[in-house]
Amino acid sequence: MASPDVVGLTPINAIALVGALGVGAQWLAWRLQLPGIVLMLVAGILVGPVLGILDPARDIGPLVGPMVSVAVAIILFEGGLTLNFHQLSDAATGVKRLVFVGAPLGWLTSALALHYGAGLGWEASAVFGGIMIVTGPTVIAPLLRQAKLGRRPAALLQWEAIVNDPIGALAAVLAFEVVVVLNTTETLSHATQALVLGIAVATALGAAAGYGIAKAFKQGMVPEYMKVPVLFVVLITIFAASDTVLHESGLLAVTIMGVVIANAELPSYVELRRFKEHTTVLLVSGVFILLAASIDFSTLAQLNWRAALFVGAVVLLARPLTVLISLLGTDLPWQERVLIALTGPRGVVLVAVAGLFGERLAALGVMDGALVAPLAFVLVAVTVVLHGFTLTPFARLLGLAGAATPGVLLVGGSRFSTALAECLDKAGLPVLIADPNRGHLRAARQAGLNTFYGDVLSEAAEHNLELAQYGRIIALSDNDAYNTLITTDLGPEFGRDNVFQIAREKDGNSRHALPSTLGGRGFAAGLTFDALEAQIRAGQEMRLTRLSAEYPVEQWQHDTPEAVLLLAIDPKGNPRLPCADKSLPLAAEWQVVWLGAKEAV
């Protein structure tokens, strides 16, 4: 930590630094294809205990604790918003097992690892073991975004992390109340009453708030521009009210509130969720920087070799045994069981709650309480780094993640899209043609291409398509409005730079021109569906050409002056599409997909 004579930052400067480091680390991680959580952890440690630039307790003061608590509540609420029962589908049995069997079993195995591995007494082991049920929604979400797991294993990890988070906090409360009864004059009946009352109040408040918000939004009782502010105010109020009755029960209340809203079928649900996702990215960044910057190396010095034994026992024994036993008898493939069993990162909630209960245990005279916080940080640091670097390659090894090379999803079956898909398939790219008209897919199926009959925005597509395999979407249907709908709706999920559509028939008419917020980026040099199909009927062909030192791009351009460049594939196998505002740096070892005359080279 920083020495006492170091002049600290002002609260405003400290908060600005936290935001810049958090978002900057995530951006850098995206550019370098590294785990964002790891970079945030490193950045926080560097500006905190290493350089002494930021000390949250010194620079921000007593508000750090409440800020982290509210941030965690919002993160859990946003997690609850993603838990739609309709999307659970074939992962439902696994989720139930991981919650109803995995939570108590994880409590037991974690307590055993703490007692026999870290050497803690049974009192501290029981309390800390309850907290360790939490697998860390603040960590799982960024890891899933990076790894692009298949739908079912991603759903299992996400649901387990979010649902078990408040359960872990409440398990710690239960164990702590037992310790209090054993070490003070408080009676067991009084402690039980307080615990039951707190859980009941949290459940009732969360359900009532979720139902009330859903009803108010559906009946138009809240104007559109006030929905997010109202949601935030109700969320924080419910969290505070529940936490007043029983500490840590607020996490249960906000999670239940999020789940109720997620399953209320609100017309504005997508907009609310996207806004909350953006907020959560900021909060996760900030909380991780604050967490890492608050570390005191002197507390870590209390640990010995048994800390490494404890971490190894958790990662290699407690977590795998808990998951594998919980999922016995389910129809999950062994690959998914192994992936989930060996994926158990811990995050902010574990450190925050462990620090709180460690202090309380020490105050009760439980000497091991002082070791809870440093053990929690070591466990978080090791699992974050371990899973941050290994989840993606491990999932690919098991065949549970998208290919290293992102594929292309073509929406709309036609002669043109079939020819394009054949070229992409020949180049080794994953490619899929989707169309709600089965007849439009006949040629693609005859060519042996992957197809999906249905609407890519439907629930059937959500349940049956592994969209994580695809990094680009090109809307090529004969319906301009449908193309615009597809690219507009999927733009936030895939990234606006990764959704494309062919030109609309009336794009040049000012009466029909659409704002830049609608639709995707231009494709095929501004040609419309009819123009592209006409070229195919006229005998033009889709071609795939590899550039090289012997056949450079200049020679290709000279040989095919009338060619329409549709797409290029860089030396790493990534599909790249030309845009009006950005040309492609074509060079040797690139492949180009183009439309041109048969006699062209």
Image (tube, rainbow, N blue to C red):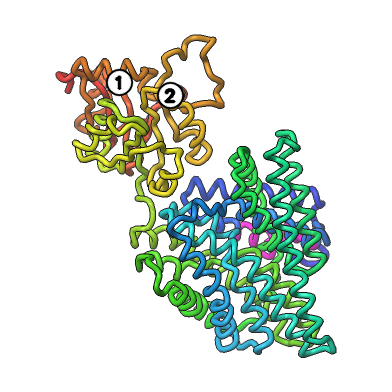
Give the secondary structure at mark 2: strand
* Disc 1 residue crowd, few under 14, some 14–19, many 20+, Cα 10 Å: some
Q: Can residue 42 be seen in this view?
A: no
Q: In this view, does 376 lie above or below 411?
A: below
Residue interval drawn in magenta:
41-57
The percent position of residue 334, horizontal first and vertical second, equals 35, 68
Q: In this view, does 523 lie above or below 59?
A: above
Q: Residue at x 76, y 77 (%)?
A: 359
The percent position of residue 421, horizontal first and vertical second, equals 27, 34
Quadrant of the frame with the C terminus: top left
Q: Label 1 sits on what residue type? A: Val
Give the secondary structure at mark 1: strand
* Disc 2 residue crowd, few under 14, some 14–19, many 20+, Cα 10 Å: some
Asked whether, in this view, residue 238 is left or right of residue 592, the answer is right
Q: Label 2 sits on what residue type? A: Gly
In the figure, residue 224 lies in which quadrant? top right
**Which residue was labeled with disc 1?**
564
Q: In this view, does 221 lie above or below 414?
A: below
Q: Residue at x 37, y 58 (%)?
A: 400
Asked whether, in this view, residue 146 is left or right of residue 446, the answer is right
222 or 534: nearer the viewer: 222
In the figure, residue 189 lies in which quadrant? bottom right
Q: Which of marks 1 and 2 is in front?
A: 2
Quadrant of the frame with the N terminus: bottom right
**Which residue was labeled with disc 2?**
522
